[in-house]
Amino acid sequence: GWVWKYGWRPDRLDDNAFVQIGPNSGCHPPIVPLSERRSAVDAAIQALRVYGGGGTNSVEGLAWAWRTISPNSPYGATRPYNRNNKKVIVLMTDGINEIVPQDNSYSYSDYTAVGYAFMERLGTDDPPIMTERINEQLAELCRNVKANEGVEIFTVLFDARNNMPPAIHNLFRNCATTPSRHYYRVISASQLRQAFDTIAAEVTRLRLT
């Protein structure tokens, strides 16, 4: 198929543009494993960039968060799952798991974590149906993560336009460990900061207890 992410000039690479061109298009820096060094975490956050294209995929975000706190590979540097070892994931998203369509291309979509739409890795080449399949995967993944003793999930839905469908609210509300204490829907930057402050206080309380 036509490799959309290489652009019209496969001989030219551009890693600095909002919409990148080249084989690493949309690829972010490596994940920082769990660390006790605040400076390492702050530096990684400051180095984060916004890339255009590809859409949101909360399944990938949650899956890699789970891997970082897992005692198994690929990181495996954490304590085992049990009630004495509290492990916390904060999943913040704009909510809409999206496969960005490309109606005029052979690929049918932007390049994503599940490849191009034409590859049918989710059993279809239709982007809206692919989004439904990703939402189903997210619900299943949330259940699997929460099944591990000592793991808590906080979800933060950043609904900046204040028009998120009820089904999306329910998806992330149900993903959280408890709907009342672990789920946050925010519509502004100030509310987003407040949500993270509240979560930080809750996590600190867990550590002290």
Image (tube, rainbow, N blue to C red):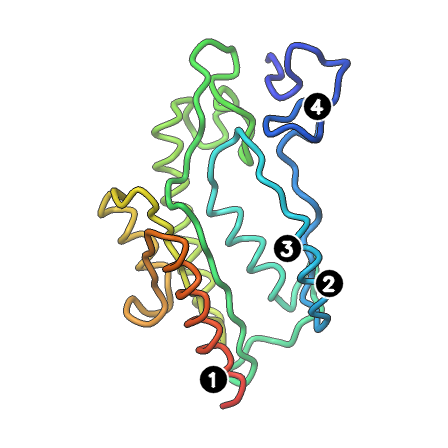
Q: In this view, does 77 lie above or below 59?
A: below
Please name which of the two marks, 2 or 4, marks the residue nearer to the observer: 2
Kind of residue sitting beneath label 4: Gly
Q: Is residue 86 above or below residue 122?
A: below
Label 3 vs 2, first from the N-terminus: 2
Q: Between marks 4 and 1, how big is the CA–CA gap?
A: 45 Å
Q: Between marks 3 and 4, how big is the CA–CA gap?
A: 24 Å
Mark 2 packing: few (<14 Cα in 10 Å), some, or many (20+)? few
For image coordinates 59% across by 17% down, the residue present is 4
Kind of residue sitting beneath label 3: Ile
Mark 4 packing: few (<14 Cα in 10 Å), some, or many (20+)? some
Q: Where is residue 125 in the image (x, y as percent from the top left)?
A: 43, 22
Q: In this view, does 204 lie above or below 29?
A: below
Q: Between marks 2 and 4, how big is the CA–CA gap?
A: 28 Å
Nearer-the-camera pick, 154 or 118: 154
In this picture, residue 3 sits left or right of residue 110 = right
Tell me where residue 136 sits by quadrant.
top left
Label 1 vs 2, first from the N-terminus: 2
Q: Mark 3 points at which residue?
A: 45
Kind of residue sitting beneath label 1: Arg
Q: Mark 1 points at which residue?
A: 205
Nearer-the-camera pick, 107 or 30: 30
Circle 3 SS class: helix
